[in-house]
Amino acid sequence: MLPPILQNLRIPVVASPMFIVSGPELVIAQCKAGVVGSFPALNAREGDGEPPLLDAWLTRISEELDRHNQANPDQPAAPFAVNQIVHRSNARLERDIEICHRHKVPIWITSLGARPEVNAAAHDCGGIALHDVINNVFAKKAIEKGADGLIAVAAGAGGHAGPQSPFALVQEIREWFDGPLLLSGAIATGRAVLAAQVMGADLAYIGSPFIATTEANAQPDYKQMIVDGGAMDIVTSSLFTGVSGNYLAPSIRAAGMDPAQLGAADAEAMDFGGAKTKAWSQIWGSGQGIGAVRDIIPAAERVERLVTEYRQAKTDMTRL
Ligand SMILES: Cc1cc2nc3c(=O)[nH]c(=O)nc-3n(C[C@H](O)[C@H](O)[C@H](O)COP(=O)(O)O)c2cc1C
């Protein structure tokens, strides 16, 4: 049984948090369209001496969604989620947890480390915590440390993807875990959302297709590269963040590098403090599912298409 907060979505989809790309415009559009919208807390970066931008973003998101709900009681917005990078290089974690707790963020998504105190903060303000994992061992650890649900990040996902097949990953986790399970990795159509459910997941976790939306905080060339690209254009490398991730080969070529000869970075080089992110700002992340993305459209339209495809896929299944 899913927690009430994850029920009643238009389609069982959580729009995943994306570094730089996901901000309030995209999150608000996703939630109004009926899927959970999310952003990494680290995307809200204020200038030196300015008040925390995260505070302002959370106020704006809550107020706009409240207004929408009052005007549309029959079609209320989906809840939103904030992603915390739980890694020692994230010097803001404690401050961001306090801000999210104060704003009573309903869904907390944690990545790159499971910490009981983050889950406790989510629970204390009435929220739930979902932790993303790339294998069954990390999945068990996350639940032991108090996460309510899991995001299985399989091969082909944008950002820090795992190496495992979604079939293997979901099957191993479902052997012992019957709580909320989201599946991530190259899910880009309503048919694939249904496939994730058939495999045993409760919801799909979708990132890259939302880069090609009008509300995404991405350069026009990046959006167009998503539209033009397909699975063959995605390369896996640990060079850019110290963790294996999936990137658009054309953006690597445009930066003067050969995608076939990237080499690896030391995991110790992982840094979410900000210094390195600028150096790689023209290297663009993406999952393998973008062959299904053919145009740059408003997020609501992307969701609408997923809903139509999902319904059609369900009808088609009855013919099997
Ligand atoms: C450009 C980009 C940035 C991402 N940044 C983050 C991030 O900051 N935190 C996080 O937990 N996941 C991040 N991810 C991973 C997504 O949350 C999610 O796992 C992934 O997008 C799902 O695969 P898909 O892109 O094939 O749909 C990012 C993905 C992309 C494409």
Image (cartoon, rainbow, N blue to C red):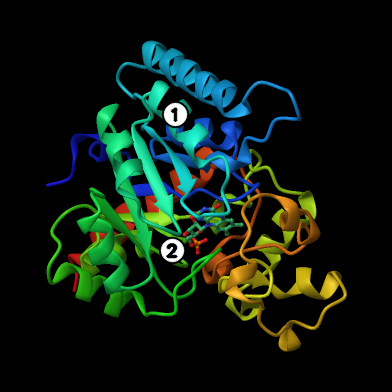
Where's residue 5, x and y in %? Answer: 25, 35
Q: Earlier in the sequence, mark 1 or mark 2?
A: 1
Front residue of 43 and 73: 43
Instruction: Decide if residue 242 is in sight here.
Output: no
From this view, report whether residue 90 is shown above or below residue 270. above
Mark 1 Cβ inside 8 Å of ligand 1: no
Pointer 1 residue: 98
Looking at the rendered structure, the kind of residue marked 1 is: Glu
From this view, report whether residue 147 is shown above or below residue 62. below
Q: Which residue lies furthest to the right in this view?
A: 256
Image quadrant for the C terminus?
bottom left
Pointer 2 residue: 187
Residue 105 is drawn in which quadrant? top left
Residue at left 76%, top 29%? 48
Q: How far apart are marks 1 and 2 (CA)?
A: 33 Å
Where's residue 189, x and y in %? Answer: 44, 60
Mark 2 Cβ inside 8 Å of ligand 1: yes
Where's residue 277, x and y in %? Answer: 72, 55
From this view, report whether residue 166 is shown above or below residue 316. below
